[in-house]
């Protein structure tokens, strides 16, 4: 059964609200989210070329739209990347696309996947959840916004990573699952 766009959007918003913002995994997320400056796009591309076309359009839209209207974009594909390793390898292509658009230093792309696994970390280690989302997701971020957020009182990026891992270890796998469970 194919998930509807409404279901994908609802699951993604629940993850943002309960995990990313609720657990303060990204202290910069709340301000843009409450101002409706986060664009969430559900892709239905049937192959990588079509998905790359969508990425091209979203990069162009992001850089040609004032940050006050769209500060960041989540490009979500619920079915194209069931395998994390394939998705992770695909991130090299994503970096090439950013370079082709001459957006290095302007836009960065963070990756999230339901089976995300850091190199050298066991698959069931809860620290992987810092980059786990309900569906494979490309997060297009304006470098300027990231720099401004890091320079603000939100603090040092390395301390944020350490705090996130500590938070998730305190929550545990069962707590993480319960947090994201559908109502």
Image (cartoon, rainbow, N blue to C red):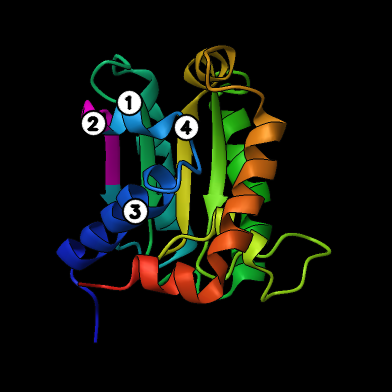
Along the line of sight, the residue nearer the viewer: 91 or 178: 178
Residue 25 point in image, percent of width and height = 50, 44
Circle 2 crowding by C-alpha within 10 Å: few under 14, some 14–19, many from 20: few
Q: Quadrant of the N terminus?
A: bottom left
SS at badge 4: loop
Extent of the magenta region:
34-40
Instruction: Identify the image quadrant of residue 157.
Output: top right
Mark 3 to mark 2: distance in Å? Answer: 14 Å
Mark 3 vs 2: CB contact within 8 A: no
Q: Determine whether 14 is above or below 153 in the image.
A: below
Quick check: can you spot residue 61? no
Numbered circle sitting on residue 27: 4
**Residue underneath mark 3:** 18
**Residue underneath mark 1:** 31
Mark 4 to mark 1: distance in Å? Answer: 9 Å
**Residue underneath mark 2:** 34
Circle 1 crowding by C-alpha within 10 Å: few under 14, some 14–19, many from 20: few
SS at badge 3: helix
Mark 1 vs 2: CB contact within 8 A: yes
SS at badge 1: helix
Mark 4 vs 3: CB contact within 8 A: no
Mark 2 to mark 4: distance in Å? Answer: 13 Å
Residue 123 point in image, percent of width and height = 69, 74
């Amino acid at each position: 059964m194919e998930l509807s766009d409404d279901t994908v959007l609802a699951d993604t918003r629940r993850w943002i609200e309960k995990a990313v913002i609720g657990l303060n995994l990204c202290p910069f997320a709340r301000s843009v989210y409450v101002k409706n400056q986060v664009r969430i796009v559900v892709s239905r591309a049937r192959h990588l070329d079509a998905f790359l076309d969508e990425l091209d359009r979203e990069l162009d839209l992001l850089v040609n739209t004032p940050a006050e209207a769209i500060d960041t974009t989540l490009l979500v594909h619920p079915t194209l990347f069931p395998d994390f390793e394939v998705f992770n390898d695909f991130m090299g292509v994503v970096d090439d696309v950013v370079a082709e658009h001459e957006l290095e230093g302007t836009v960065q792309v963070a990756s999230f996947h339901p089976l995300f696994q850091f190199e050298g970390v066991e698959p069931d280690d809860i620290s992987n959840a810092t980059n786990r989302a309900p569906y494979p997701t490309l997060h297009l971020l304006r470098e300027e916004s990231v720099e401004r957020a890091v320079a603000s009182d939100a603090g040092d990026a390395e301390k944020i990573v350490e705090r996130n891992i500590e938070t998730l270890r305190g929550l545990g796998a069962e707590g993480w699952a319960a947090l994201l469970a559908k109502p």
